[in-house]
Amino acid sequence: MSSLTQSGAAAPEATDAEAGHRRQKSLSRIGLVVAVIAVAGLIAAPFFVYPVFLMTVLCFALFATAFNLLLGYVGLLSFGHAAFFGGAAYFAAHAAKVWGFEPLSAILVGAVGAGVMGLAVGALAIRRQGIYFAMVTLALSQMIFFIFLQAPFTHGEDGIQGVPRGDLLGLVDLNRPLNIYYFVLAVFLFGFFAVWRIVHSPFGHVLQAIRENENRAISLGYRVERYKLAAFVMSATIAGLAGAMKAIVLQIATLTDVAWQMSGEVVLMTLLGGMGTIFGPSLGAAVVVTMQNYFATSDVPVTVIIGVVFVLCVLLFRRGIVGEAIRLMKR
Amino acid sequence: MTMLFGIPLPALLGQLLIGFINGSFYALLSLGLAVIFGLLRVINFAHGAQYMLGAFTAYLLLFYTGIGFWPALIIAPLIVAAISALIERTMLSRLYDLDHLYGLLFTFGLALIIEGTFRWYYGAAGQPYAGPALLSGGTNLGFMFLPNYRGFVVVASIVICLAVWLLIEKTRLGAYLRAATENPQLVQAFGVNVPLLLTLTYALGAGLAGLAGVLAAPIYQVSPLMGSNLIIIVFAVVVIGGMGSIGGAIVTGYVLGILEGLTKVFYPEASNIVVFVIMAIVLMLRPAGLFGKEI
């Protein structure tokens, strides 16, 4: 597993610990500056860019960030995260439309539902390692896809349409573009911060130790499978948060969000932005969603573009955008 | 009418046959996956796309050059194998020293490109492909009606699986292959051209997928997405069987096809997911798979 993320962000050279530490510090200072600028930019953005597009990007950015928690920091490639993203979208849409929940509680229903699914899928998947883990998650998510296809509440091919945005906590009307934008931004920042917090906690450091050398982590006395499962559930829950939010924003939940192609897209977003970096997945999500929007109106099929970017990333650009940037700065 | 477990016998046998045919394709595809994985340690996500490519090559050969089923059965797999060998040599071979997950991601991207391109040209709808005239019609077995072509597919897939198994277990080339699986450096030191062996292996696996595609063309329609729907089930089959043994992959393929067919009779709603449910149960009871060793 180690070669997967050796090139990642947080690995200082052991040769010169002192200088490495200093560099690490200046890097995290740069990170803070980037974060402040990004948040300021996101607050101002809806006045310049179409808000629905921005909100779609934010939903996918949170999805990719949640996915990266697993791939980038535990080294587990889940090829079935669409099940949590799209599943939560269905739960939230059903809660908002049929049960009449207000938006925040509908989103929570979605996230919790995704977490429960994550517990079931994760418990099975962590029994296998490496490449098998990817195949097991893919197969289980395909099973979930078929269940959603047949379950009456999802309305099959039609999906759940016309999901009401409603009034946040009964107070704020989310049908106004700016209101819902800032609500989405707040949820995104909450989820993003949660992932950042997890990664930088003692728990997160154990996860990274498992990524680097699972056997050593076991011999140090860590119950590796519990850490993996906990990380899996957290990742699934936050992916669910993103999916549930998307259902409220776009007012629709469909099979597209649970299909395996979606699982592939989130892998690409993370890989392109830089796996194992905090900002990478969000940036990757922004690039991929922009690309999809751009090519959707052209003659070139989007799937082919996605495939080409995938192949190029794997062959030539494995560190991703942010990963490359960090490497250049470290020089 | 004869009944068995409250089900009319012809219906039961009919679904059993469909299951056996599906199982033939599961076996052929998981065999190819296992051969490739055994030596290259790559999970070939493009396997479904190569299967589709085989079917489409047969279709295009017929459409543009009038070449029929029997020659296509040889030519199409060779074309698929040649294309795949080229891809292995120029791109995939650069990833062997990295984490195995990159091989999976690369072939995933490849599958998207191939399927996306064909979907762009031909749409998502299926194109009919006529089977060989020699095998049209059917045979009345007394208890059921067996279309000749389907019977041929079952026999052909068993013969192909046996041939590949013999190739790997009993020939000199197969011995090199198995040795290289155990210890590539040592085999290289003995003067065997291991990179060439890797290319041949990938071409063999991809060619098998292409062959399965040609066999499938007259039964299922030729459509750009025919492979991607199948490949995920085949992944589950491979997880159930464990990728340690070639024989295990073959047996698991047939057994799961038949189990799926039976599910269609007794509880049709679950027929889409039965393979995945079995996978979950196997993971709980025998995480390494039925025939597998943990790697």
Image: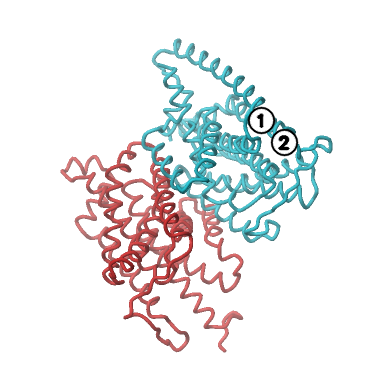
Chain colours: A cyan, B red
The chain under label 1 reads: A
Mark 1 to mark 2 CA distance (whole Å): 9 Å
Label 2 neighbourhood size at 10 Å, few (<14), some (14-19), many (20+)? some
Q: Which residue is mark 2?
A: A177
Label 1 neighbourhood size at 10 Å, few (<14), some (14-19), many (20+)? some
Closer to us: A47 or A257 = A47
The chain under label 2 reads: A
Q: Which type of secondary structure does the marked residue at label 2 adopt?
A: helix
Q: Above or below — where is B44 with respect to A64? A: below
Q: Which type of secondary structure does the marked residue at label 1 adopt?
A: helix
Q: Position of residue B50 (x, y in %)?
A: 37, 56
Q: Is residue A230 visible?
A: no
Give, as a three-letter code, the residue at label 2.
Answer: Pro
Quadrant containing the N terminus of chain A in the rendered view: top left
Q: Quadrant of residue B273?
A: bottom right
Please indicate whether residue B280 sits to the left or right of residue B156 in the image. Answer: right
Please indicate whether residue A323 sits to the left or right of residue B168 in the image. Answer: right
Give, as a three-letter code, the residue at label 1.
Answer: Pro
Q: Which residue is mark 1?
A: A46
Please indicate whether residue A107 sits to the left or right of residue B124 in the image. Answer: right
The residue shown at (23%, 60%) is B170
The first of marks 1 and 2 along the sequence is 1
Closer to us: B136 or B243 = B136
Outermost residue to the left: B191
Q: Position of residue A199 (x, y in %)?
A: 58, 27
Count of numbered labels shown in the rendering: 2
Q: Quadrant of residue A175?
A: top right
Q: Are marks 1 and 2 in contact (CB under 8 Å)?
A: yes
Query: Same chain for marks 1 and 2?
Result: yes
The residue shown at (39%, 47%) is B110
Q: Above or below — where is B271 with respect to A316? A: below
Closer to us: A89 or A174 = A174
